[in-house]
Image (cartoon, rainbow, N blue to C red):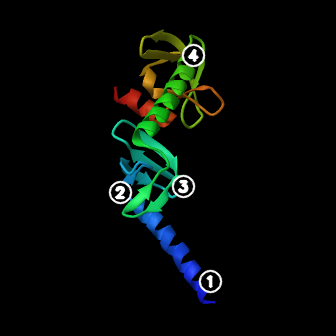
Amino acid sequence: MNFKIAFAAAAILAAAQTAQAQDVGATVNGNDGAAVGTVLSNDGSTVVVDTGTHQVPLPADVFAAADGGSTLNTTKAELDQLYGEQLAQAAAARDAKLVVGAAVVTADAQPLGTIDQVDGDNIVIREGEFVVTLPRDLLALDTGGNVMVRATKEAIMAAVAAG
């Protein structure tokens, strides 16, 4: 019986150490013992770590408790490289879809219009008389591979109305 109590206490303590180490502002170390970054946010399932180069969202279950905080089974350099590659792939996929005539939706899945013109980093979207120019970085691909603005239709319309 004492073994079960000790085991349960150890499991609770380990969980508490992991949760505490992932508190906002906590430093996360890599498998090399060096700092990977600082926790920016933790919603219980996703922990965002600021490496100084990227703000990387990671599943909460990839962290392990360690003396003085939490650790990841990677180094800062490896994490920055892998996340940078993911960002580059996502940007390339997005850019391939930024063509005249492509439909554009908002983050809340509302139609916004179609791409009327691609002028460098400025993307002109038109729907009838409604015309808006958005920076390329405000666009992404949704889970279905469609061009999506990273804002709700309400936020876009409010920004347009504000001038």
Question: Does dot 2 land on a helix, a strand or a loop?
Answer: loop
Which residue is labeled 1 in the image? Answer: 4
Q: CA distance from mark 3 to mark 2?
A: 16 Å
Which sits earlier in the primary sequence, circle 2 or circle 4? 2
- Relative horizontal placement of residue 162, taking residue 43 as reference (left or right): left
In whole angstroms, how far apart are the C-alphas of marks 1 and 4?
57 Å
54 over 130 or under it: above or below = below
Crowd band around label 3 with a 10 angstrom C-alpha radius: few (<14), some (14–19), many (20+): few
Residue on which disc 3 sits:
45
Number of other residues with Cα within 10 Å of mark 2, as a class: few under 14, some 14 to 19, many 20 or more: some
| Element under disc 3 | loop
Q: CA distance from mark 4 to mark 3?
A: 32 Å
Per the image, the residue denoted by label 2 is 26
Residue type at mark 1: give it: Lys
Q: Which residue is mark 4?
A: 96
Q: Residue furthest right?
A: 144
Query: What number of labels is visible?
Result: 4
The disc labelled 3 sits on which kind of residue? Ser
Q: Is residue 132 above or below residue 64?
A: above
